[in-house]
Amino acid sequence: MEKNLFTLTENEKMELDRIKTEIHKIPNFPSEGILFYDLFSILRDVELTEILFKILEKIITEFNSKLEEKINTIVGLESRGFLLGMVLAERLKIPFVPVRKKNKLPGDCYKINYTTEYSNDTFEIQKKAINEDSKILIIDDLLATGGTLKAAEDLAKLANAKVCGFLTVFEIEFLKGKEKLENKDKSLSLILI
């Protein structure tokens, strides 16, 4: 993460440290050798949830203030990106658009195949959901190998939308998933693992 994309106050850094301490870490899930950071353990705590969303909203607002073309749509990835994206879109008063796995969305969809550390799959976005006027921020809980974020970026290109950036709560740095993204310099992660 580039240091100039957003700044946190000392109080916000302390609040973020609390989230890092409180989050449940589950070994060997979803497969052997993976240490899973369970976002739901934070969302079950009302106070920690408010802290998380307050910081994420601030990051987006600060990041957006530096862009020539302002974000006008949040795109959330199945499934934790839905939870984060819908709340943040409502707070920012902009539309939310989901990216889902194949055969989950009605109507005509753009489709893209992708690979993650666990599987091969297909992502879809409805063709009328975004277009050349869309300036999007792609949101998910985790940036690991970059497969899902790259697939969402490619879907946006199929729709002629502009990807302004990416936002994740966690980033596993050593996997270098950010390197797959065309807009890797606009990738924001709250907690680096």
Image: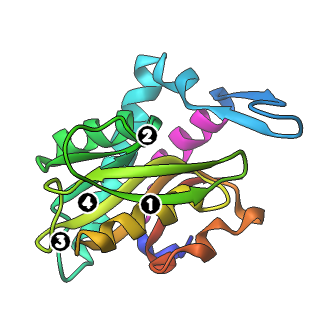
Nearer the camera: disc 2 or disc 3: 2
Q: Which residue is mark 1?
A: 112
Q: Main secondary structure of the magenta part?
A: helix
Nearer the camera: disc 1 or disc 3: 1
Q: Which residue is mark 3?
A: 70
Q: CA distance from mark 2 to mark 1?
A: 14 Å
Position of residue 9 measured from the top left corner of the image (x, y, whole percent): 44, 55
- The residue drawn where x is 37% and y is 33% is 83
Q: Which residue is mark 2?
A: 78
Position of residue 141 measured from the top left corner of the image (x, y, whole percent): 51, 44
Nearer the camera: disc 2 or disc 1: 1
Q: Which residue is mark 4?
A: 61
- Crowding near the residue tagged with mark 3, few <14, some 14–19, many ≥20 C-alpha atoms within 10 Å: some
Nearer the camera: disc 2 or disc 4: 2
Label 1: element kind: strand
- The residue drawn where x is 74% and y is 32% is 30
In-front residue for pair 139/3:
139
Type of residue at label 1? Ile
Q: CA distance from mark 1 to mark 3?
A: 26 Å
- Crowding near the residue tagged with mark 4, few <14, some 14–19, many ≥20 C-alpha atoms within 10 Å: some
Q: Is residue 115 above or below residue 150?
A: above
Q: Report if the CB atoms under discs 3 and 4 are less than 8 Å apart.
A: no
Q: CA distance from mark 2 to mark 4?
A: 23 Å
User: The magenta stretch spans which residues?
Assistant: 6-20
Q: Is residue 23 above or below residue 144?
A: above
Sequence-first tag of 4 and 1: 4
Type of residue at label 2? Glu
Sequence-first tag of 3 and 4: 4
Q: CA distance from mark 4 to mark 1?
A: 30 Å
Q: Report if the CB atoms under discs 2 and 3 are less than 8 Å apart.
A: no
